[in-house]
Amino acid sequence: MTGPAHSGTHHLLAFDSGIGGLGIVRALRTLNPALAIEYLADTAVFPYGEQDDAFLVERVLTLISEAISRLRPQAVVIACNTASTLALDALRAAWPEIPFIGCVPPIRWAARLTRSHVIGLLATRATIRRPYLNRLHALYAPDCTLIAHAAPGLAACAEHLFRGEDVPPSAIQREIAGLFDRDTTGKLDAVGLGCTHYTFVLEQLRALAPPRITWLDPANAVARHTLTLLQNQPEVPSPSVQPRAWFTSIPPEAEALRRKLPDFGFDEITLWPSLPA
């Protein structure tokens, strides 16, 4: 499959532990269809939110460094909240010439939108327990009550839904019930998505939650910020071969996943040729 007909573009790498970052890829392609985007999913150790911090820092740094050396992107989108909060500093120190765009919990956005000053965050256990979240709260929402809820199985629900599999509403309801159980005043009105996978359960979240809730998905904001940074980068020749979707291990129900990839600009699942789990 040949690349776009025009002569120049920008070359990006988007990274996640699974399919969550494809929501940001979709937003990027909507804003600029000419982008050349490589996608790398570390499916060998999915989900990141349940892994040890030290292991993840070393793994993300090694894997992204390998990908930069091999693929030569102009910028890297760390389309994963867990990897962003853990490894962005190490990546920027190792590759100071490469712009890195991370994903952080949308606490500031929620604080701007709330009327009740009670905001929520739906995320993985790893994101919820980190001091980074406390710093975001103190910096950007000091006058708000933050209800931060860990939903350890919601990313897996998103993966199933993405592949077209049935996920009963009760399974998603169990994952988010604690968020609303802790809203004892009934004032919670803005909830941020603190995991990129949750893009693919957003419709179900809206259907199951009280109608007063505004759900905040940062995918479009991350895409816009990425394009702003790329304005300072020269265009490069368009690739002669379509950039690939790389996976560190063959994911479950791979054929169902492969059928979805063309919607995001990719033809096939390609196995990343190193880094055992």
Image: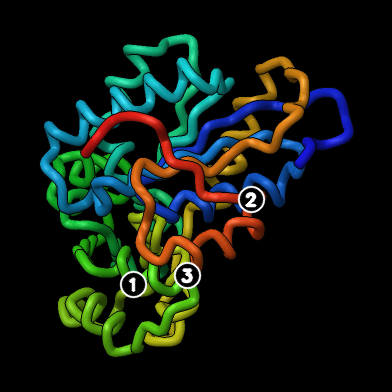
Residue at the spot 26% in from the left edge and 76% down from the top edge: 176
* Residues at discs 3 and 2 in contact (Cβ within 8 Å): no
Q: Is residue 14 above or below residue 221?
A: above
For mark 2, give the secondary structure.
Answer: loop
For marks 3 and 2, the one nearer the N-term is: 3
Residue at the spot 37% in from the left edge and 18% down from the top edge: 92
Image quadrant containing the C terminus: top left
Name the residue carrying label 3.
163
Who is closer to the viewer here, 63 or 191? 63
Q: Amino acid at mark 1?
A: Cys
Q: Is residue 121 above or below residue 73?
A: below
Q: Is residue 76 above or below residue 232?
A: below
Residue at the spot 14% in from the left edge and 37% down from the top edge: 53
Q: Amino acid at mark 2?
A: Asp
Label number found at residue 267: 2
Mark 1 to mark 2: distance in Å? 24 Å
Does 188 sit left or right of 58 as displayed?
right
Who is closer to the viewer here, 76 or 189? 76
For marks 3 and 1, the one nearer the N-term is: 1
* Residues at discs 3 and 1 in contact (Cβ within 8 Å): no
Which circle, 3 or 1, is nearer the viewer?
3
Name the residue carrying label 1.
157
